[in-house]
Amino acid sequence: MDEGARILIVDDDPDMLHLIGVRLTAAGYQVTQAESGEAALISFRQQRPQLVITDLRMGEMDGLTLFDHLQKEAPTMPVIILTAHGTIPDAVSATHRGVFSFLTKPFDGQELLRRTADAIRLSPTLDPDQDSAQWRKELITVNVRMEELLRQALRISEESRTTLLVGPGGSGKSTLAKAIHQAGERADQPFVTLSCTDFPAHEQEQLLSQDDPAGVFAEAGNGVLYLQDVGTLSPLAQSRLFQLLFAQMQVKDPLHRLNAPTRRNIAPAAQVITSSPRPLDGAVAEGAFRSDLFYLLSGSTLLLPPLSDRLEDIPVLAKHFLSRLRPEANLALAPEALSALLEGRWPGNVRQLKNVLGQVAELSLTPIIPEAIVRRVMRELEEDCLTAFDDARRDFERDYLIRLLQTTGGNVAHAARVAQRNRTEFYKLLARHGLDPASFKQKFR
């Protein structure tokens, strides 16, 4: 049993609430009670339990309606429904909709504990202070959406599934990839990162070759290979990655293997995690990213929200970062300083917040950080971002050229016409960004 697991009980019968509460508390669980579906939703959002046990028949919001609300906010949350004999068909139908289990009143106390233990095993604690949750200690959050994302990540780690992480820059994709590695059975195996934007097309293709002993698959071995910005892979690199992942899928799935042609390549052993700052659907529609690879990668997709969608995390993130930056100083933010952070714009997300707090920690002469220092650092960093326009333009220009060459198959004359540049000028642009049009001539296959 997961000692201390949090359970929310919902029933409009006070006696039933008391009875279930006593049994579960005696078994070592932390129990919260709610006498209506509406009250249960409020409690759920505040405390994020690991299991909900709810009566089927209640007042304005019955157990199934409550379940539907929970499913929208937390699809992995197990729910057990309590039902009377006359409503068993409704409860059976509910299990087809995703309800974990149901118990018929009057229920046996031992059966309640067995069902509860089974559900808790599928919904382990995410408290980073617990030894069993150290895998996510760098992912600090009190946001319900982020907690649900972490539950999905935990299941992915247990099943070693290929995963696509989508989220804006600085939202924590690399941190989440490392957490998935630490949570699974591969934690003692290598974690290898390949930033796809750091290499020209021909080097991408070589690094992703299964036959190259210096390639990233060989380096990752039985561990995890993390491909950052996978959408920038060249057509040939995409083709090689697809072939390797498809071969891996055949090994895992006997039905695919029976009907598949014999392949020369041995499937790689590494779990593959990929990331993109934006959804890849658009690149697929434009023909810049092969659809079959997209479907392989996106079977398990985790969407990381921007910091602006999880403002309640700013206080806990700030406390976490300050404790790491100068632990001996016992730094804390003045209430006005925290308000300044909550009012700020965070296009760089968690990474930007960490940078702000890093400078604030260096500048503060007192344990309580004043508002003036926070606002000064935020203003200066915003000005720095504005002066980095040339860097942003270069990044945009290179991304545009890559997509253009991918779309035109490396046809310089066609690409130059689309870009409304003469060929000489277009070749100079390519040279400036180290792009070889010949590497884009490889057709998807």
Image: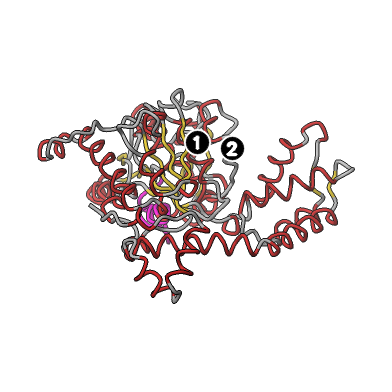
Q: Is residue 374 left or right of residue 214?
A: right
| Residue 250 falls inside the magenta stretch | no
Label drawn at residue 307: none
Tell me the magenta residue range. Answer: 53-71
Check the image and name the residue furthest to the front: 424
Label drawn at residue 138: 2
| Any part of residue 330 in sight | yes
| Residue 224 position within the rendered picture, expressed as x and y whole percent measured from the top left | 41, 33
Amino acid type, callout 2: Glu
Instruction: Indicate which label's residue lies in the foreground, 2 or 1.
Output: 1
Q: In the rendered structure, which disc, 2 or 1, sits on the residue that comes first in sequence?
A: 2
| Residue 332 position within the rendered picture, expressed as x and y whole percent measured from the top left | 79, 43
Residue at figure coordinates x 44%, y 76% from the top left? 420
Q: Are marks 2 and 1 in contact (CB under 8 Å)?
A: yes
Amino acid type, callout 1: Lys
Residue at figure coordinates x 81%, y 31% from the top left? 328
| Secondary-structure class at tag 2 | loop
Instruction: Check disc 1 and report the residue beneath it.
Output: 178
Place residue 225 in its image quadrant. top left
Q: Is residue 377 left or right of residue 27?
A: right
Q: Is residue 257 above or below residue 98?
A: above
